[in-house]
Amino acid sequence: MNEIIRLNNIRKSYDRKHYVLDGVTLDVASGEMVVIYGDSGSGKSTLLNIIGLLDHFDSGEYWFHTSRIAPKGTKNLSNLRAESIGFIFQSYGLVESLSVMDNIMLPFLYNRFRITQDLLHKIDHTMKEFQIEKIKNKKAALLSGGEKQRVAIVRAVVKKPILLIADEPTGNLDENNAMLISTCFKRLSDAGVAVLIVTHNTHLIYHPDQSYKLIQGRLVKCDP
């Protein structure tokens, strides 16, 4: 398996006194599903933002696939992020007034990807895979929570990212929909995508390859 994430002794502070992350070390390979638990305010979102190339870190080493990421800067990483990382958020991140299809197309339009027939076929295939092809013309405002999250997943994975980052992806879902989304993540990891899930809910069964809890700025390994 190819190594997708390698963090070594990552530290991050917002006030130069208290470290939100204080020596985080983590390795994630392609096809691995990794779950990070943590209480609110423990630094989970900060860690995801650093891994997702949205925020800088103060010290330590970060390798993303074959690229070494420098501390104190996220400039010139937008192309790498757009091409290689898919994001799924608890709030779904959908534009309520747009259709399912238009929401899925948004990242490609924003990043000025060329819209080809091959891309449209990939979108159709992925919508069928996640059982949302029949609602592709429906406005996002009219969707259930489970449908919205599946739309968000399709939007994140249709570009074939090597890393999928999910921040509290089941926080707004009932148990049945949460398990459905969990199954989707497992399917993606089986297909070779590195899946990183952050949650405070320890009761959901993700069947992860690795499981950690973020405590006082450090990752403590748990039983999967």
Image: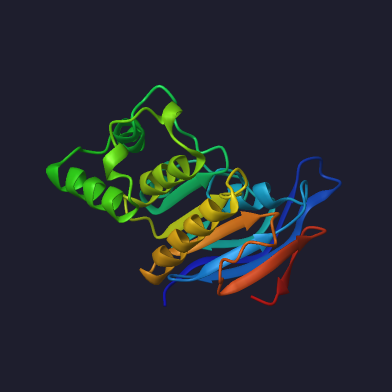
- Nearest the eye: 52 or 123: 123
Residue farthest along the right direction in this orientation: 17
Residue 69 lies, in percent from the top left, at: 53, 55
Residue 212 lies, in percent from the top left, at: 68, 68
For the point 64% across and 70% down, which residue is it? 211
With respect to residue 196, does 73 lie above or below? above
Horizontal placement of 94 versus 112: left or right?
right
- When asked about the image quadrant of residue 11, the answer is bottom right
Which quadrant of the figure contains the N terminus?
Answer: bottom left
Residue 214 lies, in percent from the top left, at: 74, 61
Q: How many marks?
A: 0
For the point 57% across and 61% down, which residue is it? 62
Q: Is residue 36 visible?
A: yes
With respect to residue 193, does 88 lie above or below? above
Which quadrant of the figure contains the C terminus?
Answer: bottom right
Horizontal placement of 167 versus 103: left or right?
right
- Nearest the eye: 207 or 83: 207
- Nearest the eye: 77 or 3: 3
Residue farthest along the left direction in this orientation: 117
- Nearest the eye: 34 or 136: 136
Residue 179 lies, in percent from the top left, at: 53, 59
Q: Is residue 95 visible?
A: no
For the point 80% across and 51% down, which residue is it? 19
